[in-house]
Amino acid sequence: MASPPIRLLHETLVLSAAQYADKHALVVEGQPYTYAQLLDAARRLASWLQARGLQRGDRVAIFMDNTWPCVVAIYGTLMAGGAFLVVNPQTKADKLEYILKDSEAAFLLTDAHLAKVFAPAAVAATDLKAVICSGKLPELTRNLRVPVHAFADVLAHTCSPAKQAQTISIDLAALIYTSGSTGNPKGVMMTHQSMVFTVDSLVQYLRLSADHRILNVLPLAFDYGLYQLIMALRVGATLVLERSFTYTAQVLGRLEQQEVTVFPGVPTIFAMLLSMHRHQKLRFPSVLRVTNTAAALPASTIPELREIFPNALIYKMYGMTECKRVSYLEPEELDQRPDSVGKAIPGTEVFVLDANGRPAPPGEVGVLHVRGAHVMLGYWKLPDRTAEMLKPGRYPGERILCTQDHFKMDAEGYLYFVGRSDDIIKTRGEKVSPVEVENALYGIAGIREAAVIGVPDEILGQAVRAYVVLEPGSTLSDKEIKKICLARLENFMVPRDVIFIAELPKTATGKISKKGLGETAQ
């Protein structure tokens, strides 16, 4: 008998647990948990939430580290009929308060060590019905206006199975809060339908199976990290979950011990690995897939990544929270098209439009648009911002995603990222792609990381400024860097300023923050 179609996100856990009950679904900081254990814990939490009044579509905020309780919270919320939102544990109290109020969260699941942050935010969040806290309940929680329950007690004292929620595929599954260039974070609305479609597309092009063991050091609040979990449970694989990449030696030790086969990273993680590799050779033959997103992976890094991961298929990808993933480059095309981020993921369509809304000719810069079931429902309670991103599509009533990012597409349909709409530098009457300059900088021996922005200039309009982090022991000067750039770039693209910096500002997900650089440039 054929398996029933998967319509709801949590059904992936139910089906995988039925097939792989005693297999490890998770290894959290070395501690294994089986599929049966995860399903049981999620059902217990779901039952508890329903008994305390959770209704279909209610939002449940999860302010936790990458831990077992965090994963249980995600799937318990879904099974209860709620929509989850994972908040990065590095979030400060004022932003957490905003998110709790904005989402009108009915429940908050959190960690005891975060009490100084969540307690004041919970006091101000008037929609909260209860807080569930992992770890020993801190003193700060005694004065909250809502009851606070220990996570372990909730699971231990709840036995009845959760009622079948009346959720359907177009109901909200998650709010994924993403910070814009200005203002408060926006809640990206993702339905069960869009997330199920997306995970099926991802596992198809990444060629994942139950045999894989996926390492995740990225926050589950970051959609790239979240989908490592969702993909693992979709195919019956094992997720090796770490809190972060901060303790690099420990994480790499875990990678070897657990025989990890899939290594997802962002450019800052790969920059750290490459720097280590140049001083003491690294080699991880068990890894069969390496994936990158969040920012472009410079082509110059690929040869050394192949030394570190000699048996891996390396995937360059492009995506954004509003649709999770846009494109990927088949690993077999990497040498032929080292600067491309590939074609649309399976089951979707992409196209580049010029300033007049017409298809841009091959090789011409335009704005990338995305069409598919993975496109967000919109921004939570932000109709005007939603209208900026979702435009009329091919059919009446259809909405397509306008990424606001500049791309070129070649005659064969391969995409080339040029820059964010607000990143493009206009200097001497020319438009400069920061990515192109950064790729040139990454190709210079001795440079570990680089970021390029435009700064105001009375004569040029904007001047190109490069911020550079050197490898330990490098003696590169700004004159040497400019000279090499001049040999590789057009004159107007060569940085006027080369600023040496010990560390580039990063977001909580490890992405280089150009906004932070812009603030230092004022």
Image: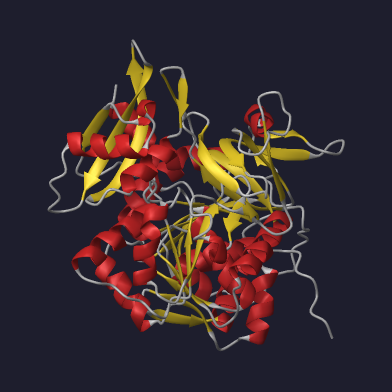
Where does residue 351 sit, x and y in percent of width and height?
69, 41
Q: Residue at x 70, y 54 (%)?
A: 194
Side (left or right) of 187 relative to 399: left
Residue nearest the observer in this picture, 296 or 179:
296
Above or below 298: residue 135: below
Side (left or right) of 73 relative to 193: left
- Looking at the image, can residue 80 be seen? no
Farthest bottom residue in view? 22
Farthest front residue in view? 487
Where does residue 23 sit, x and y in percent of width and height?
54, 86
Q: Quadrant of residue 257?
A: bottom left
- Looking at the image, can residue 502 be seen? yes
Which of the image's four quarters has the N terminus?
A: bottom right
Above or below 489: residue 105: below
Q: Residue at x 87, y 35 (%)?
A: 396
Q: Quadrant of residue 187?
A: top right
Residue nearest the observer in this picture, 421 or 235:
421
Where does residue 173 sit, x and y in percent of width and height?
66, 55
Side (left or right) of 186 relative to 3: left
Farthest right residue in view? 396
Colour scheme employed for the rendering of this structure = secondary structure
Side (left or right) of 97 relative to 85: left
Where does residue 334 sit, x and y in percent of width and height?
51, 60
Q: Residue at x 56, y 61 (%)?
A: 333
Query: How many badges with numbers are in the image?
Result: 0
Residue nearest the observer in this picture, 138 or 222:
222
Which of the image's four quarters has the C terminus?
A: top left
Residue nearest the observer in this picture, 195 or 84:
195
Above or below 466: residue 33: below
